[in-house]
Amino acid sequence: MQKSHPYIKNELLAEILKPKRIVFIVNPRAGTNLQRNIRSSVESQLDHKKFVYGIWHTESAGHAIELVQKAKDELYDIVVAVGGDGSVNEVASQLIHTDIALGIIPAGSGNGLAMHLGYGRDLDKAVRLLNSATVRRIDYGTLNGKPFFNLAGIGFDGLVSNMMKDSKSRGFIPYFFKSVEAGLSYTARHCRIETEDRLFEGKFFAIAIANGPMYGYNFQIAPDARLDDGLFSVVLLKDAPKWQYFAALPASLNGKIYDAEFVEHLKAKWVVITSPGKNYVHIDGEGLIIEDELRFEIKPGALNILAPAV
Ligand SMILES: [Mg+2]
């Protein structure tokens, strides 16, 4: 690690001017393959007066957890997840309740959190944005104790995530076709939804529990979601004729999904959902099947995230 700046006696100032230690944890299997050029991007775009860097590659699912521990042991200030929503979830889960900041270089198909923060899909640009990014303290959510950072869902979008798990192809087109297939086959299920001040019972096509507003591709399921308000945005898609869901797609791309007749939305600190049988669920795009009660809780201000300056 670099010592204090030799010309500056003031220790606080020296601390500020000391290069930050940043490590990139790269998922070599991420969807878009952008990550193949990460080393040359970091060499050419990162401000080397501000940062000293490391680049580490994960070798298997779960390896990121070990690598984040190594980053903690080696006193890194910033850990950047280079990958998709799954990689971001794995890395961020190890950084909650610490002072280490999370950066994201999107290299997956959705990357809703990174897109909302403004990292974009250009690798060089995303790396360059780290130079002027600032640290924000954000919330995260848990589902039955498991952390998520952008979105969790039950119903239709949970089915899509479960279908994508078995699919070899990644990216927008396969995702779109799986969504149509799931949209046609999924039927609204009876659910009981309880929050600190509301109770709903009825048939729902999907329920989104949102920390961030979008899935990626600018598809905004919860346009009013804020990462730091200590609340989930909860979006209920009620049972309706299928054509109404398809007809609402353009509105959801314009942040207007709440205008649709079948949508109900609210804010909540916690949500408990019970529904008989197997529930198709996703957290940050990872498909799960859960038969128990689903308990969502917001954890306010518990993650430092490096957000591009706007
Ligand atoms: Mg919020």
Image: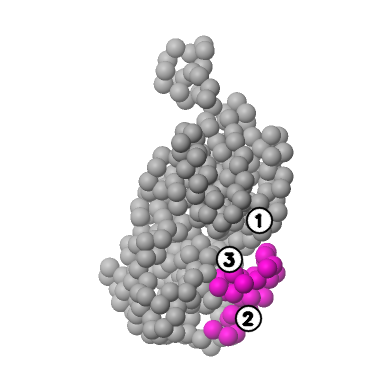
Residue segment shown in magenta: 160-186
The residue type indicated by label 1 comes to: Arg
The residue type indicated by label 2 comes to: Glu
| Colour basis | one colour
Q: Is 171 part of what is drawn in magenta?
A: yes
First-in-chain label (1 vs 2): 1
Q: Residue at x 62, y 28 (%)?
A: 48
Q: Which mark is residue 29?
A: 1
Nearest the eye: 167 or 106: 167
How much space separates mark 1 and mark 3, taking CA atoms? 24 Å
Q: Is 85 part of what is drawn in magenta?
A: no
Q: Residue at x 35, y 74 (%)?
A: 293
State the SS at label 2: helix
Indicate the position of residue 78 as horizontal and vertical percent values: 51, 39
First-in-chain label (3 vs 2): 2
Vertical arrangement, residue 17 with respect to residue 297, above or below: above
Which residue lies most toward the left here?
Answer: 197
In this orientation, does residue 21 appear? yes
Indicate the position of residue 1 as horizontal and vertical percent values: 52, 25
Q: Which residue is mark 2?
A: 181
Nearest the eye: 31 or 181: 31
State the SS at label 1: loop
Whether residues under marks 1 and 3 lie with C-beta atoms below 8 angstroms apart, the answer is no
